[in-house]
Image (cartoon, rainbow, N blue to C red):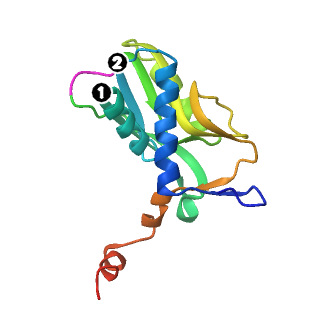
C-alpha cells in the first residue's frame, strides 16, 4: 500500500510473493534461456531463491552492502564481496542477476560492470521487483516502477530490530 504522500510503500508477505511470481513470468515471457541465477544478498535472496526453484537453475550469491546507517535507511559506501558463492563451477554463460529493487541504481550498475568484465559470462540480464524513479539503472525485467521513489517497507524488515530475547517473548504465555 502506497501512502497518500507517496513517500512510503508498505508491502505484505502476500504482495511480496506475488511480485516475485510476476517477475518470474516476465522473465519466462521473454523466452531468454539463461544458465544461472546470481542474487545479491540480502535483498535479492528471496526473489533469487524462488526464481532458482521455478526455473530449476543453480543459484549463486554475491553479498553487497551499502545501507547500514539509521537501521538501514541511509546509503553509504558500496561494499561488494570479492567472491561469489555457488555450489560448483564458476559463474559463466548466460546469467540472470536478481535483486529486490533498483533504488539509486548505484549497486546494480557497479555489479553489472564487474560481471561484464568476467570473460566467462557471455550474456547478463538483470531482474528486480521495483525500479524507483530516481534510479540511474533500468533492469531488463521489473514488476513495478515507483515514480515518487518511496521508501519500501518490505515484510521481512520486522526482523531488522528483533533479537532472540524479543523473539522468545512471542512464544511465552
Q: Is residue 72 left or right of residue 84?
A: right
Mark 1 and mark 2 lie on one chain; the one further toward the N terminus is 2
- In the figure, 66 relative to 136: above or below? below
**What whole-number distance in Å separates the C-alpha atoms at marks 1 and 2?**
10 Å
Q: Residue furthest right?
A: 5
Q: Residues within 10 Å of mark 1 (few under 14, many from 20)?
A: few
* The C terminus sits in image quarter: bottom left
Q: Residue at x 76, y 48 (%)?
A: 148
Rendered image: mark on residue 35: 2
Q: Quadrant of residue 142?
A: top right
Rendered image: mark on residue 56: 1
- Counting from the top left corner in percent of width and height, residue 25 is at 48, 29
Q: Quadrant of residue 9?
A: bottom right
Q: Residue at x 54, y 31 (%)?
A: 110
- In the figure, 13 relative to 41: above or below? below
Image: magenta residue range: 88-92
**Which type of secondary structure does the marked residue at label 2 adopt?**
loop
> Would you say the magenta stretch is mainly helix, strand or loop?
loop
- Counting from the top left corner in percent of width and height, residue 79 is at 47, 42
Q: Residue at x 39, y 30 (%)?
A: 38
- In the figure, 159 relative to 33: above or below? below
Q: 109 or 87: nearer the eye?
A: 87
Whether residue 91 is visible to the viewer of this picture, yes or no, is yes
Q: Residues within 10 Å of mark 2 (few under 14, many from 20)?
A: some
Residue 90 is a magenta residue: yes
- Counting from the top left corner in percent of width and height, residue 57 is at 31, 26
Q: Quadrant of residue 48?
A: top left
Nearest to the eye among marks 1 and 2: give it: 1
Amino acid at each position: 500500500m502506497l501512502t497518500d504522500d507517496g513517500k512510503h510503500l508498505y508491502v505484505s508477505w502476500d504482495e511480496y510473493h506475488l511480485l516475485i511470481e510476476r517477475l518470474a513470468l516476465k522473465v519466462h515471457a521473454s523466452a531468454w534461456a539463461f544458465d544461472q541465477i546470481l542474487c545479491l544478498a540480502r535483498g535479492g535472496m528471496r526473489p533469487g531463491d524462488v526464481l532458482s526453484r521455478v526455473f530449476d537453475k543453480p543459484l549463486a550469491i554475491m553479498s553487497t552492502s551499502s545501507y547500514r546507517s539509521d537501521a538501514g535507511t541511509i546509503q553509504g559506501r558500496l561494499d561488494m564481496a570479492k567472491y561469489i558463492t555457488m555450489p560448483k563451477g564458476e559463474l559463466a554463460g548466460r546469467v540472470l542477476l536478481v535483486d529486490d529493487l533498483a533504488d539509486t541504481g548505484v549497486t546494480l550498475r557497479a555489479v553489472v560492470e564487474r560481471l561484464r568484465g568476467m570473460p566467462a559470462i557471455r550474456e547478463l540480464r538483470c531482474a528486480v521487483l521495483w525500479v524507483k524513479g530516481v534510479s540511474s539503472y533500468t533492469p531488463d525485467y521489473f514488476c513495478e516502477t515507483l515514480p515518487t521513489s518511496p521508501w519500501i517497507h518490505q515484510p521481512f524488515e520486522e526482523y531488522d530490530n528483533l533479537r532472540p530475547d524479543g523473539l522468545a517473548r512471542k512464544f511465552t504465555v
